[in-house]
Image (cartoon, rainbow, N blue to C red):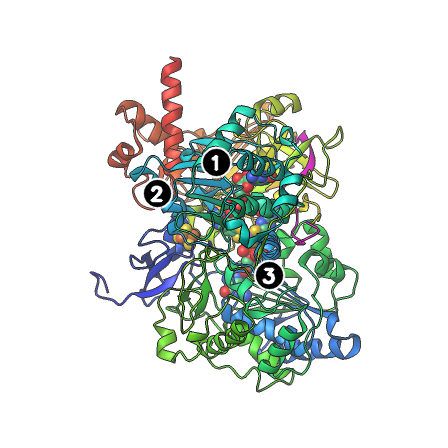
Amino acid sequence: MDGAGLPETRSTCPYCGVGCGVLLRADGQGGLTVRGDPDHPANKGRLCSKGLALGETTSTEGRLRHPSINGQEATWDTALQTVADRFSQAIRDHGPDSVAFYVSGQMLTEDYYVANKLMKGFIGSANIDTNSRLCMASTVAGHRRAFGTDTVPGTYEDLEQADLVVLVGSNLAWCHPVLYQRLAAAKKQRPDLKVVVIDPRRTATCDLADLHLQLRAGSDVALFNGLLTALSEGGAVDYAYLSHVDGFDTALVAASVDRMNETGLDRRDIQTFFNLFLRTNRTVTVFSQGVNQSSAGADKVNAILNCHLATGRIGRPGMGPFSVTGQPNAMGGREVGGLANMLACHLEIENPDHRQAVRTFWDAPVMADHAGLKAVDLFRAVGQGQIKALWIIHTNPAVTMPDADAVRDAIKGCDFTVVSDITGATDTARLAHVLLPAAAWGEKDGTVTNSDRTISRQRAVLSPPGHARPDWDILSEVGRRMGWHKAFDYETPAEIFREYAALSHIAGQFDRDFDISALSDLSDHGYETLPPTRWPVTATRQGGRFFADGQFYTPNGKAQMLALQYRPPAAKTGPRYPFRLNTGRIRDQWHTMTRTALSPRLSAHLAEPFLEIHPDDAARTGLGPASLVRVTSPVGTAILRTLITDRVRKGEVFAPMHWTSDTAPSAQIDAVVPDVVDPVSGQPESKAAVVALSPYNAGWYGFAVSAAPMSPTSEYWAMSRTPAGWRAELAADTVPETWEGYGRLLFGLTDARLQILQDTGRGMARLAFYQRDTLLAALFVARDPVAVMRDYLVTLPGAEAPLVLTGQSPANMPDPGPIVCSCFGVGMNTLLAAIETQSLTTVDQIGAALQAGTNCGSCRPELTALLTRAKVAEAAE
Ligand SMILES: Nc1nc2c(c(=O)[nH]1)N[C@H]1C(S)=C(S)[C@@H](COP(=O)(O)OP(=O)(O)OC[C@H]3O[C@@H](n4cnc5c(=O)[nH]c(N)nc54)[C@H](O)[C@@H]3O)O[C@H]1N2
Ligand SMILES: Nc1nc2c(c(=O)[nH]1)N[C@H]1C(S)=C(S)[C@@H](COP(=O)(O)OP(=O)(O)OC[C@H]3O[C@@H](n4cnc5c(=O)[nH]c(N)nc54)[C@H](O)[C@@H]3O)O[C@H]1N2
Ligand code: SF4
Ligand SMILES: [Mo]
């Protein structure tokens, strides 16, 4: 309870793998207030911008309320029977491997458990793979090769206790913001804590870095092989610990082939990094998608693990390799056997004893006896007609799989596709034969595991809209209707969790590390009140770290170092495709934006898709500031806004992954990324496509604001939400017959009063639509990218705004500029003005003056960058 007197419910944030605890209070009318849970070990009360905006994203607007079959509303009874019948029929006619599930690291452990049990134990196929294949598969493979198990050895506290934190391919400031804040706080307290960032881009995370190694994309193995050699030559090898490790000598021989020129880094910077690593015992190496999403992803992981094994810096306070997970339950999915090549509880599908034990435990009729198709192969098989029935749950592969257009075509061509989602407005949901409404976060109960093995409860505080049901419940009922009544007779998630915990006891008997058997007799009340709990949880052990004792889970109990050779990314740049395309995330959006884009605050940070390009490359490609650029790869094309910046290396460009047909149809970046995968892990190389760039010179450019959603049709458009409605960027080749006609169609305003200003000779038009004096919508058109005060104009729809057509704010109402602090809505112009007029020199002073950066803190790296910019400008004067 807090001051307001209403009870608060503890739950867990549904976004990133930090797994922050939240305190939720429903207002009884569908609204929700959210604050950080001071007692949760992951965040101790902190939240980032996305977590804080959760209350703005739980409205039932746009939610699926009932099942549908071929677009027609259907009852649950008909829909579920159709799913069960069509899957059963495909299995009868074509065998168990003719069906597949594609699921998600955002599902609850209980959802995952039921899906996995149904596919692997009852249907008898392992054709269940998850979007974690695009996310964590290389780490899973690397961990298993080195440790014999997929286990993160350490805990979050290690980042705070370390003397050196190396961040490899991780934009922690934007993607794991609360963990970043914990690290920033530790560094502030103990400035001797050094941070090294290894990333081809200068990201917001570099704000904290003592050293940024801006290496060439894909060259991490060359760098870490060099490091292993330096550790050996510099006397940092822990020979006592090596008695627990095989493969040191061969790994060292392979590593001694010097390929460090491939990194493109200055040798002195490399040496600085090596020296730091050499002399710092308490070292944590955090890694993420810059490592995993690579055709050498598993090798990159093992190159990092090699260095930690050789120095014995593993599983001890402040020491260890640390893969941070992306999705809220990426870790839980790995534990519960969500990947096509695993069984539940770290048991292995290739191991007949493991299979038999699971089969007996489940009393399963048939057990999958070989690994199933991994995501990319799975959708290829769908495309080739080998999969007759496909069920996609909690993920949007038509947007996020590589070669996304081919994936979309494959799904479209599948005989029978089921999609479970919370909204029907996704590129994948639109392709479903049967569309099932899922209960969303905040409406259902279950567990998730975060990056440091802490299992936390998500709890329901809202009612699902219409007939929506939790995923575990939908899956269980299909299992029952397929004839396995007893095995899927679950009534609560607690029952599922207890069964899962009991299964982990068997895993313990096979000497697997994932053992939570002490939770197998948890009462319903115990489940309801389960506090955050780090596994293992057995009669004799709870939580802690792994591997300091030298006990591994390989057949001979020793860790394995690997002999690794640097391999460049699969696609080669050349005259035809001279640029390397890196892709990733932005601070305030989550993947395909089905939830975060509902929040105007989150949408204000970066409202449009963009391509970061170095100034020299922009000049030689003929790209001006804010112009549009066409990005073409061997598989597809996209149009993006040019963002000229020296944050990227020459020859490398970066685009975010978030936009879809609903938000910016020509900016879907996975249409450009080919489906090349790592041969070991099957994880796609999402960050190293090769592309050609050319200016997209449109016939006209437009900027529009509106109180209601718009219906753009132009070649290029990008639309996002604002506090007053919507905004859109537009561009197209052909000038419409009349701007009035175009505007009325765009805004759906047939009779509204129009104010128009036109100069046909200069290709300029400005239109404002009113109801009486209230502005409904406005459109600004020019022959070049439109220069108007966007951040002022977006505030006007719904207001009395007689003077819109100037496109400028009146002198007494300065344009705040693009939003930097989304908590308090503070724009860049406001910040720069205050920095100058009030001579602010620190982020804390900015906070005192404008509040910016004082709530969630996610924008603090950007505030530092603005201070630096202001200082540079002053020095230049
Ligand atoms: N705001 C936000 N946060 C998120 C998410 C989100 O959608 N939005 N998604 C969550 C999920 S599922 C995930 S998996 C995580 C991902 O978290 P991160 O991995 O931190 O995020 P990315 O932006 O995908 O990529 C990280 C960095 O890898 C760099 N990189 C690219 N190629 C290379 C390379 O060859 N070597 C090295 N060393 N670096 C390289 C990129 O420049 C980029 O800055 O974020 C989670 N958190
Ligand atoms: N180019 C490029 N591509 C990438 C990446 C990259 O860095 N670059 N990153 C990859 C990575 S790491 C990841 S994790 C993936 C993520 O990619 P996806 O998982 O495909 O993206 P999301 O937008 O998170 O999709 C989640 C879907 O689940 C729905 N949903 C929300 N809540 C529920 C619920 O409770 N139940 C059900 N059934 N549905 C729900 C949402 O509406 C949404 O449609 O993208 C991958 N693709
Ligand atoms: S860091 Fe932000 S997105 Fe990640 S779990 Fe915490 S509040 Fe949620
Ligand atoms: Mo991910």
Does residue 424 lie above or below 48 as drawn?
Answer: below
Disc with the residue nearer the chain's start (1 vs 3):
1
Going by the image, does 566 lie left or right of 437? right
Q: Which mark is residue 278?
A: 1
Residue at the image point whose x is 48% and y is 49% from the top: 322
User: The N terminus is located in which quarter?
Assistant: bottom left
Q: Nearer the viewer, residue 188 or 373?
A: 188
Q: Residues within 10 Å of mark 2 (few under 14, many from 20)?
A: many
Disc with the residue nearer the chain's start (3 vs 2):
3
Residues at circles 3 and 2 in contact by the CB criterion of under 8 Å: no
Residues at circles 1 and 2 in contact by the CB criterion of under 8 Å: no
Q: Which mark is residue 857?
A: 2
* Residue 784 drawn at (x, y percent): 58, 27
* Residue 208 drawn at (x, y percent): 40, 35
Q: How many numbered discs, if any? A: 3
Q: Amino acid under label 1? A: Leu
Q: Which mark is residue 771?
A: none
Q: Amino acid under label 3? A: Thr
Say whether residue 438 is visible: yes
Going by the image, does 298 lie left or right of 320? right
Disc with the residue nearer the chain's start (1 vs 2):
1
Front position among marks 1 and 2:
1
Residue at the image point whose x is 64% and y is 85% from the top: 483
Question: Is disc 1 placed on a helix, strand or loop?
Answer: helix
Does residue 74 lie above or below 545 as drawn?
Answer: below
Q: Which mark is residue 554?
A: 3
Q: Residues within 10 Å of mark 3 (few under 14, many from 20)?
A: some
Does residue 55 lie above or below 274 as drawn?
Answer: below
As measured in the structure, the alpha-carbon distance from the residue carrying label 1 to the one carrying label 3 is 28 Å
